[in-house]
Image (spheres, rainbow, N blue to C red):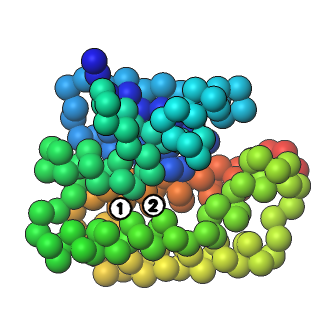
Amino acid sequence: MSPILYHHALSPASRTALLTIRNVDLDEYEVKNIEMTADQNSVDYHNPLRQVPVYVDDDFILTESRAIACFLASSVQKFYPTDLKQRALVDSRLFYDATNSSIKDFVLPVLYGGAKKISKERREAIKDLLKTIESFLMKSKWIAGDEVTIADFSYLANVATIKVIFVYKIVNA
């Protein structure tokens, strides 16, 4: 049976896993799009937190987008350096991305809470985050060096979400 990635299109975390699985050139895999409001129970038995993404390969179940990305990239030795210092830099960028709540605090109220306005505090936090990302890119061609890595997939998914929110707010203003 082919591995399955349970995914939700609006989830930056899901898109990180999706970008990774599409780029590591697995021979076969299946992506199951989940509508969290309707299909939430379908991921219950895989992830007790009822969150996507979830990667299932027979009896192996992996949750958390960056763990999925690390596993997939490591399995094909692509997009995740084997050199310890380079890998540590990728991990550093991934951990920063995972622990910075600016995007989540910015996105969730709009997409799921029906917020009509984005607070000045949240806009400032996003500006600070974008400045940090820019500082990474001033030092190298990509987020964590001169080659594309899974860190780039993670940041791309998050920054694209910021753009979607701005477009959404303009269209629905």
Task: Look at mark 1 in the image and give the residue it sits on.
Answer: 151
Image marks 2 and 1: residues in contact by CB distance under 8 Å:
yes
Residue 141, image x and y in percent?
Answer: 28, 69
Q: Residue drawn 14% across and 50% down?
A: 77
Please tell me whether mark 1 sits on a helix, a strand or a loop.
helix
Give the amino acid at mark 1. Ala
Residue at figure coordinates x 66%, y 77% from the top left: 125
Which dot marks residue 40? Answer: none
Q: Residue at x 37, y 38 (%)?
A: 61
The image position of residue 76, as x and y in percent, is 15, 44
Residue that sits furthest to the left in the current view: 83
Q: Name the residue under label 2.
A: 155
Question: Position of 11 compared to 1: left or right?
Answer: right
Inspect the image, locate mark 2, and give the three-letter code of the amino acid beneath it: Tyr
Image spot of residue 71 (x, y percent): 27, 49
Residue 29 versus residue 118 in the image, above or below: above
Callout 1 environment at 10 Å: few (<14), some (14 to 19), or many (20+)?
Answer: many
Side (left or right) of 78 relative to 115:
left
Return the residue nearer the eye: 34 or 93.
Answer: 34
Residue 86 in sight: yes
